[in-house]
Amino acid sequence: MGLQGYLALWCAASGTVALVGYVRSLAGVTAAQRAVRVAGRIEQVREPRHGSSQHDGIPVVVSFQDPSSGEEFTVTNDRDRGERIEAAWTGREIGVRYRRGRPHTYQFFTGDLQAGRRGLGWPNFALFLIYVALVIFAAIDWSWPWALIGFGVPWTLSGVWYMPQSARAVRRRIDALTSQSPVPGRVIAVLTDTSTDSEGGTFTSHTPVVAFTTREGTTVTAYCADDLPTPATSRGRDLTVHYDPDDPALFTPDLASEDRSRRLDITCGTVALLLGVAAVVVGAALL
């Protein structure tokens, strides 16, 4: 079997996966559709232990109700329970997902409660694999510039779609962080993780945990994503915290870093878009 035969087999297998996935989604029987998703509520926030691992997340107690039985459950995230909770306060809503009829298998997630409910991730990925095979076939059977066009067209379209949305999101983030005066905060713990690379070297990361109280009276405990100077020794350090009043999980002790991040994001997006356009232009010119 030649390369074209393998590509045809690849497309047939990927197409079968995509077709089965879409049929299952239409029938409402994918794992994502069968799972129960409810909104839980953080009832208690515990201070992370200084020196513990960042992979554990902020220790919380969460309550949720099983809609089928009406039973209330109060649980914790002291084991591997889905997404790591990096920002917590009493009263915050947290997504809870579990298999129908088995609420003890709960998993936490902090994103949109409705996102991914149709279970189309794998079918969409299978379609992408078919597209890759077709681009390879065109590049081999016709001429290699088709590979540039096949790469450049979706790359350019994704850049055109992503850049305006990213710019608006960054603008909204900056506006929210500067909508009112900041509040005092404090580093209450530093979490430490040590990993080993492929060459046997060790790398140690330090994650400060910040506590602050919003002007609305909400006490927030959260990982500090921004790089603080000398994070390993930052425990007990006082900070000035800018936060989003509508979502205190969005905060920063350094507005200047937000501006640098915005410029870097715009620069990377522009370069990526130009790469896609250049690939299409060069590929078309060489045909």
Image (cartoon, helix red, strand yellow):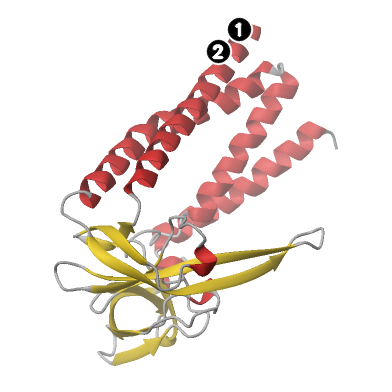
- Residue 206, given in percent of the width and then of the height, sits at 55, 66
Image quadrant assignment for residue 188: bottom left
Q: How many marks?
A: 2
> What residue is drawn where x is 28% and y is 70%?
212
- The answer to which of 17 and 238 lies nearer the viewer is 238
Verify CB contact (< 8 Å) between mark 1 and mark 2. yes
- Above or below residue 98? Residue 168 is above
- Residue 138, given in percent of the width and then of the height, sits at 67, 23
Q: Is residue 249 visible?
A: yes
Quadrant showing the C terminus: top right
Q: Which residue is mark 1?
A: 285
> What residue is drawn where x is 50% and y is 66%?
207
- The answer to which of 53 and 17 lies nearer the viewer is 53
Report the disc number at residue 166.
none
Quadrant showing the N terminus: top right
Q: Give, as a three-letter code, the residue at label 1.
A: Ala
- Residue 69, given in percent of the width and then of the height, sits at 28, 90
Mark 2 secondary-structure assignment: helix
Q: Give, as a three-letter code, the residue at label 2.
A: Val
> What residue is drawn where x is 51% and y is 19%?
277
Q: Which residue is mark 2?
A: 281
- Residue 263, given in percent of the width and then of the height, sits at 40, 34
- Above or below residue 164? Residue 142 is above
Judge left or right: residue 261 versus residue 185: right
